[in-house]
Image (cartoon, rainbow, N blue to C red):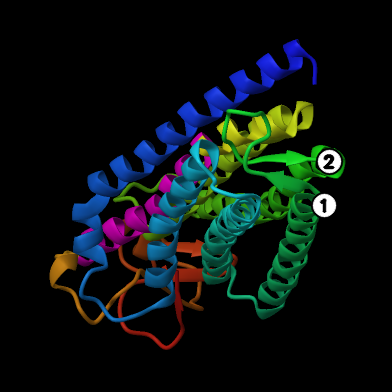
Amino acid sequence: MDANAIEGFANTILVSRYCSICGLTMCLTDIFNTLPREVKYYWGTPKSIPKTLYFYMRYSTSLQQLLLTIALFHPGSDLVSWIFVNIQLLIGLSLLWSIEIILIIRIHALYSNKRLLIFMSILFLCTMSVSSIIGFRGANTAHWLAEGIPGLPCCTANNSTLLQDTFWASWIPTLVFESILVGLAIRALRRYREFHKGLHGPETLVWTLLRDSIIYYLVVLVAGAIYMAVAKVQWFNGEPASSVLFPVISACGVRLLFHLQAKNAELRGQDMSMQVLHTHTEIKFKTRPPRSETDIESGSGPTSTVNGLDQIEGPIDDTRTI
C-alpha cells in the first residue's frame, strides 16, 4: 500500500476502535438500565423459550462487542484473529435469528395456522442457511492477520476480494425474511383496527405485539441499509457500523419481550415479580361468533379479533406462547 492508503487504513482502524468501545459501553449501560425489569420478569421464574431467548439476546451482544474490541486493539495472533472473526459473525447472525424466532411465534399466535407456521419455519431455515453461507464463506476465504500494518496491532484481512464482494450481502436474506414477517403483522394489524373501529378502551396485548414488531422491523431495516451501504464501499467500514448497530438491535429485541410482559401484567392486574405460574406472556385465542351490538354497547364479549380469531382473557384450551 502507498502512504495515502496506509494513512486511510490507519484512520479507519482508529474509528473502528472508538466505535467498538462505544458499542460495548452501550451494551453495558443498557444492561444496567434494564436490570430492574429483568429481575422483575425473568429472575426466579421457570425455564421457558422466551426466557432463554431473552438472556441470549441480552448478553451475547456484550460478548460480541468485547471480542470485537479485543480484536481491534490487541488480537494476539493470526489464529486468534480468525477465531474472533468467526465467533463475532456467529453471535451477530444468531442474535438476528433469536429475534426472528420470537417474531415467528408471535405471528403464529395471531394466525394460528399450521401451514403458515410450516411456511415461516422453512423460509427461516432457508434464509438462515443462505446468510451463514455468505457470511462464513466470505470470512474464511480471507487470510486474517493480527498486524496488517507494522506497529499497529489490529485484526484485519489479507486477500479479501471475496469478502469485499459478499460480506455486506449476508444482510439481504435477513431483510427479505423479516419483510415477509412484518407484512403478515401489518395484515393482522389492519384486521385488528377494522374490528376496533369506533371502539375505545385500554391498549390490548395484540396491539402491543403488532406495534412493537413493526417498530423493530423498521430499526432492522435502517440498520441493514446502513451496514450494506458502508460495507459495500469497503468491507472494513462495516466494523464501526456493526459496533453501534448490533447493540441497538439487541436493545430493541429485549424490549419486544419487556413491553409485552409489562402489558400482560397490567391487563392481569398482577405484580409480575410475584408471578410464578405464568413465566412468559400468553395470548389466548378461541373461535367465537361475531360480537352482537348488545355486546359492543355493554363492553362484553371478546376484546379483539385477528383472522377470525377472538382474543379473550381467561382459561381456555388453545394457548400460544409468545
The foreground one among 174 and 182 is 174
Q: Is residue 139 left or right of residue 83?
A: right
- Residue 152 in the magenta stretch? The answer is no
The residue segment tinted magenta is 244-268
Disc 1 marks a residue whose amino acid type is Thr
> Which percent across, then down, holds residue 102?
51, 64
Label 2 packing within 10 angstroms: few (<14), some (14-19), many (20+) = few
Q: Is residue 89 left or right of residue 168?
A: left
Marks 2,1: beta carbons within 8 A: yes
Question: Image height check: is 269 above or below 138?
Answer: below
The foreground one among 192 and 168 is 168
Quarter containing the N terminus: top right
Q: Is residue 24 left or right of residue 137?
A: left
The residue where tag 2 is placed is: 159
Q: Which disc is residue 226 wearing?
A: none
Question: For the residues marked 2 and 1, what is the alpha-carbon distance in whole angstroms?
Answer: 8 Å
Disc 2 marks a residue whose amino acid type is Asn
> Which percent across, then down, holds residue 129?
76, 65
> Which percent across, then down, holds residue 272?
19, 66
The residue where tag 1 is placed is: 141
Question: Image height check: is 315 above or below 217?
Answer: below
- Residue 253 in the magenta stretch? The answer is yes
